[in-house]
Image (tube, helix red, strand yellow):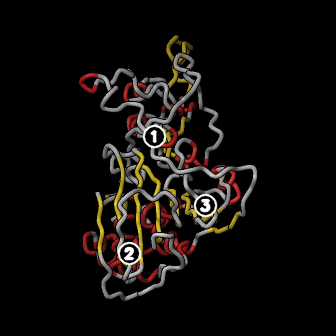
Amino acid sequence: MKHTTQAKPASHAVTLPYVNDSGYYEIRLESIGGLGANLCGKLLGELGVGYLGLNASAFSSYGSEKRGSPVKSYVRFSRPKQDILHNSPVEHPHLLVLFHQALSSSQPVTAGVREDCVLVINTSLTPEKMRDELRLHAGTVCCVDALKLALQSKSRVNMVMLGAIAKASGFIPLDAVKDLVTATLGKKYPDMLAYNIAGLELGYQNLTVQFFSSDKRYETLPYHEAQSKWGYQNAPLGGANTHFGSTVSNDLYPSREGFIPLYLPEKCIHCGLCDSTCPDMVFQFAPGEYRGKPGMLNQGLDYHHCKACLRCVDVCPTEALVAGKEHEHPEKQWFVRNMDLIVDKLDFEPAGADSEVTSESYLDELRVDGGLI
């Protein structure tokens, strides 16, 4: 899906700080479905044309339209007299935006990053820690806890990230972004406008920035297009999925959106409703004794297979399972591996997920697109 537009008279005309050999300033957004990166990319394209006096091109790349699936969005800016003739993915971004920190553990998100690149990352970690986690050769790392700020402002992650992008770019005025959001999302969701503006401001104000020069410990990662193991020549006949129980040998950690089910064993009555509703064989039961009677007792969760749909939280009758922020629980004492399903290697496979942030199923408040009304 591609959208290219020509510059219009601008209310916040800017000058691009630098461009590549083709005359473009390029942005790549790396995310998973449900965090709003696709919309953020569209808004950036419209921002360039309608408010900054630039030419712009914006398009996205994604597979199935479901929560948790990898999403990439590409934006190109050029000076008013410079036409944008490329419609290929952005290989060497000037600005790389990582909406979901966990993608770095499974996807080559820093591919094509050079020393002049600015990285904006949704994380609670410091730039130093993110640099090591990304194994980044060089570049400027900007960190913002977008999930925390989205909850604080009652907006969405993409609004916080849009404000952070404006600050990290060095040339996008925050007032221009506010005008854009007011004219677009404000018109569609007027009750959400104040919350979205608050999210923009928090993202702009709470960015931690640090530059890292080249480090011999880490190598530059060349850009290459992701290739599927199955194609039209070797896919199973009829599109059958021969990998039954398709998540048991895959690590679903990168498809979670910041929340996980927390297990409170002292409240558990071992009714098994969590196991019945779980789509991914997460809960581990073993023979034991409860209230003087033998039975199968809940031992905990195997988070390798949990995509944080939080259905177990919804169904638990005693609140032995509650939703919590994953970054607040790095050490999970209730994390129990499924001995029957342990494999030598866990691969990341995108999976749909219902985020507690944007789902009405687990909330008392009325929400529209993840924001409180």
**CB atoms of marks 1 and 3 within 8 Å:** no
Dot 2 crowding, Cα within 10 Å, few <14, some 14–19, many 20+ = some
Question: For residue 194, which numbered disc appears in the image?
Answer: 2
Name the element at disc 1.
loop
Mark 1 / mark 3, whichever is N-terminal: 3
Q: In which quarter of the image is residue 292?
A: top right
Q: Tell how many labels.
A: 3
Nearest the eye: 36 or 169: 169
Name the element at disc 3.
loop
| Residue at the disc numbered 1 | 308
Percent from the top left, x then y, of residue 27? 47, 65
Image position of 236 (left or right of 216): left
Q: Quadrant of the C terminus?
A: bottom left
Nearest the eye: 60 or 80: 80
Q: Which residue: 53% across, 32% down?
A: 304
Q: In which quarter of the image is the N terminus?
A: bottom left
How far is disc 1 from disc 3 in space, using C-alphas? Answer: 34 Å
Residue 162 higher or lower than 66, as above or below: below
Residue 258 visible somewhere in the drawing: yes
Q: What residue type is labelled 2?
A: Ala
How far is disc 2 from disc 3 in space, using C-alphas? Answer: 37 Å
Residue 105 higher or lower than 279, as above or below: below
Q: Which residue: 47% across, 38% down?
A: 319
How far is disc 1 from disc 2 in space, using C-alphas? Answer: 29 Å
Mark 2 / mark 3, whichever is N-terminal: 3
| Residue at the disc numbered 3 | 114
Mark 1 / mark 2, whichever is N-terminal: 2
